[in-house]
Image: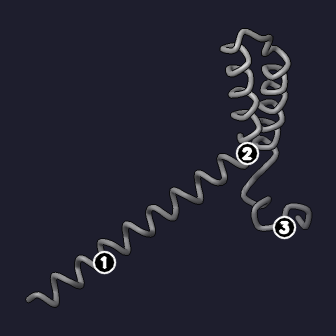
Amino acid sequence: MQKRQRRQAGQGMTEYIIVVALVAVAAIAVYQLFGQVVRSQTAAMAKELAGEDGSEQSRMAQTAAEAAAAQTAAKTLKSFTGNAGTQ
């Protein structure tokens, strides 16, 4: 009986690890896509809180956001397999 409970606990832990790994991969992908936007927005807020002009950082964030939006519009499932140009 105890052996079965240990197996089930191990299975639960394995499932948990898989879910955590998938969330980590998704977070890395989102950060890759929007990382510059977040950094620029944070820099703009820090400058504004310090009493300085953060408009340059805000413009950089807007430019990065537009570039990220263009990337997401251009990417399809074929882009991720490396076969986008073959068909």
Numbered mark located on residue 83 in the image: 3
For label 2, the SS is helix
Q: Position of residue 79 (x, y in %)?
A: 79, 59
Q: Quadrant of the C terminus?
A: bottom right
Location of mark 1 (residue): 11
| Amino acid tagged 3 | Asn
Spatial separation of the CA atoms under disc 3 and disc 1: 36 Å
23 relative to 40, above or below: below
Q: Are marks 3 and 1 in contact (CB under 8 Å)?
A: no
- Residue 62 drawn at (x, y percent): 79, 24
Q: Which mark is residue 33?
A: 2
- At x 84%, y 26%, the residue is 60
The CA span between labels 2 and 3 is 21 Å
Question: Is 16 on the left-hand or right-hand side of 54?
Answer: left
Q: How was the colour assigned to the protein in this rendering?
A: one colour
Considering every residue shown, the one lying at the far right of the view is 85
